[in-house]
Image (spheres, helix red, strand yellow):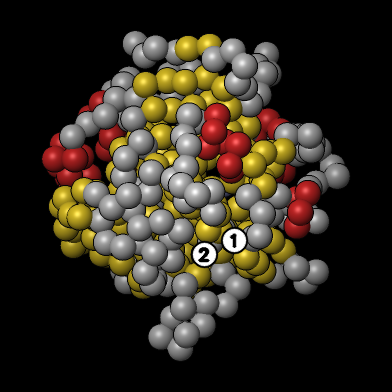
Amino acid sequence: MNPEAQDRSGASGLRYSLEVPSLEDLVDVFRIALEANFRNVAVRIVDCPDLTEPPYGMAAKGISKSTKISDVGGVRYLTPLPQLDHKYDLQTIAKESELSPPYFIMGAGCGPYQDVGCNCELMANVAVSSAGVVKNESRIAKLDKDGKCQIERLQTTNLAILGNFFLSAGEPGKVVEIRAEGRTGSENFVSILRQAVRARYQEKPVGIGGVFLVEKGSLNIHVMPDFSKAPLETEGTVDQWLKYFTQPAPMVFMSVFVSEDPGWDLRCEHTHGYGVPDAEGSSQNRGGHYHYDTTPDEVEYVGYFGCAETLYRIDRPPSSS
Ligand code: ZN
């Protein structure tokens, strides 16, 4: 059941092979699940649009070739008290995920407190060319002095504590396009997709990465405040510590999910995003960790998704038992 888990001496991680369904099968799995949860649904295989173009603004054109997921660190380095020695670099993560340039790495994590000066949300969006030139479209979301959400561009590829990333050569290629309007079910968009893949492939872990746009409606988002000085011992105290916002579309999200955790201590679903310019050209200070949309009637999702071939578990926290 557990596909070729390998010790990789000399590196800090473990490598696992993922189940890789055909895109045709994924279309069926996604479509059936979405039709049960949205009013209007269209799912098909397309050539990936150029994701560097607005509104997506990714650092690479596509998400194809040499696809991988890296699950780095974990919540146990954040709670009950932060373990600040767990610092990472997206470029090192790519190397430990056996990718050399050119590559594209995107996803969700804790931002680099060591550079930003406080704990924050990371929206990782970085391409490195074969010549080693770094194109950094990453942002962080943090709280300002008044507790308002503030978005900043990043110059660094550093991060800390934890992260969930989808890596690829960043090439254009075939992907699954999803359009879904008018949510009728109670689950969030990403959980619907993950649970559908879980139901279809059961204990075989399938890893998916994608970029999606919420065109209309608004979203429930959290932004982490600076590190807590009081221990966050329970889910309840974590929830009180997090700052929740309702933020309006349009927003672009980067999503990474794995259908099933066969005991690799994975974070199975993680999605971060940020505001993109609306009709007035304002992207305001919107962004952070996606929970769900708050406007089921009017919400509209469009996204592009592909499968990862391999999963890397980097700096896995030691067992808490
Ligand atoms: Zn998050």
In this rendering, the answer to whether 168 lies above or below 280 is above
Dot 2, crowdedness within 10 Å: few (<14), some or many (≥20)? many
Residue 139's disc is 1
Name the element at disc 1. strand
- Disc 2 marks which amino acid? Tyr
In this rendering, the answer to whether 308 lies above or below 104 is above
Residue 61 appears at what percent x and percent y? 35, 58
Residue at position x 44%, y 53% from top? Answer: 254
Q: Are marks 2 and 1 in contact (CB under 8 Å)?
A: yes
Residue, disc 2: 274
| Nearer-the-camera pick, 267 or 209 | 209
Lateral position of residue 224 relative to residue 129, left or right: right
Residue at position x 54%, y 15% from top? Answer: 8
Residue 35 appears at what percent x and percent y? 18, 52
Lateral position of residue 238 relative to residue 176, left or right: right
- Disc 1 marks which amino acid? Arg
Between marks 2 and 1 in the image, the one whose residue lies nearer the viewer: 1
Image quadrant assignment for residue 317: top right
Q: Earlier in the sequence, mark 2 or mark 1?
A: 1
